[in-house]
Amino acid sequence: MKVEEIDHIAIFVRDLEKASKFFADLLGTEFSQTFVQEKFAFKNSLEPLGIEVVEPTSPDGFVAKTIERSGEGVGLIGLKVPNLEEAITEMKGRGIRLVSRIEQGQLKTAQFHPGDTYGVMIELLQYKVEHPIAIAMSK
């Protein structure tokens, strides 16, 4: 499977504010505002290197269940791929279970079961990156 880059690494934590401060101080960076993902029962914040901290908002969500089962730590690795359909086919061909797919605008993602990938959920992402000047000029 062709992977273009590591898009992000999600660290599942019990306290988003405390973890964000820790990693910001450690890495000399700043985290974005906090986003609440009600549909998936978590809130998260990212920083420019691709480190994402994720806190559960419900004991029934997959983040809370992962923390309960395995403790805090790396829960997901996001990989940017040029062709999501081809990558999904390859992952399934290796016996790796697809657990969900999400499409939001030009972003397409697929998440794979951590039981098949050494305890870390793999998320494949396909999106087009526009040059910052093109983005600014379109506004």
Image (spheres, grey):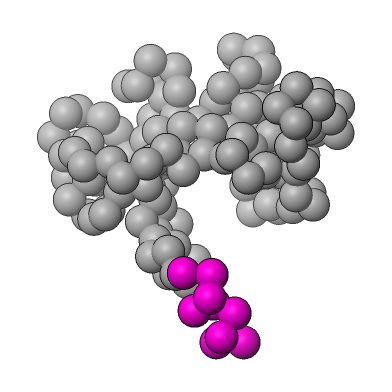
Question: Which residue is located at x 37 percent, y 47 percent?
Answer: 80
Q: How many marks?
A: 0
Q: Is residue 94 left or right of residue 106?
A: left
Residue 66 vs residue 54: left or right? Answer: left
Out of 66 and 84, give the one closest to the viewer: 84
Above or below for 22 versus 17? above
Q: Can residue 42 be seen from the camera position used here?
A: no
Query: Image point 55% across, 87% down: which residue?
Result: 138
Residue beneath the point at 24% across and 45% down: 88
Which residue is nearer to you in this view: 32 or 12?
A: 32
On whether residue 99 falls in the magenta region, the answer is no
The x, y position of residue 84, in whole percent, is 27, 53
Quarter of the rendering occupied by the C terminus: bottom right
Q: Position of residue 69 (x, y in %)?
A: 60, 14
Q: Would you say the magenta stretch is mainly helix, strand or loop?
A: helix
Q: Over which residues does the magenta segment extend? A: 131-139
Which picture quadrant has residue 113?
Answer: top left
Relative height, residue 24 to residue 71 (above, below): below
Q: What residue occupies the far front of the structure in this picture?
A: 133
The residue drawn where x is 36% and y is 56% is 126
| 117 to the left or right of 85 | right
Residue extending farthest to the top is 70
Q: Position of residue 124 (x, y in %)?
A: 37, 44
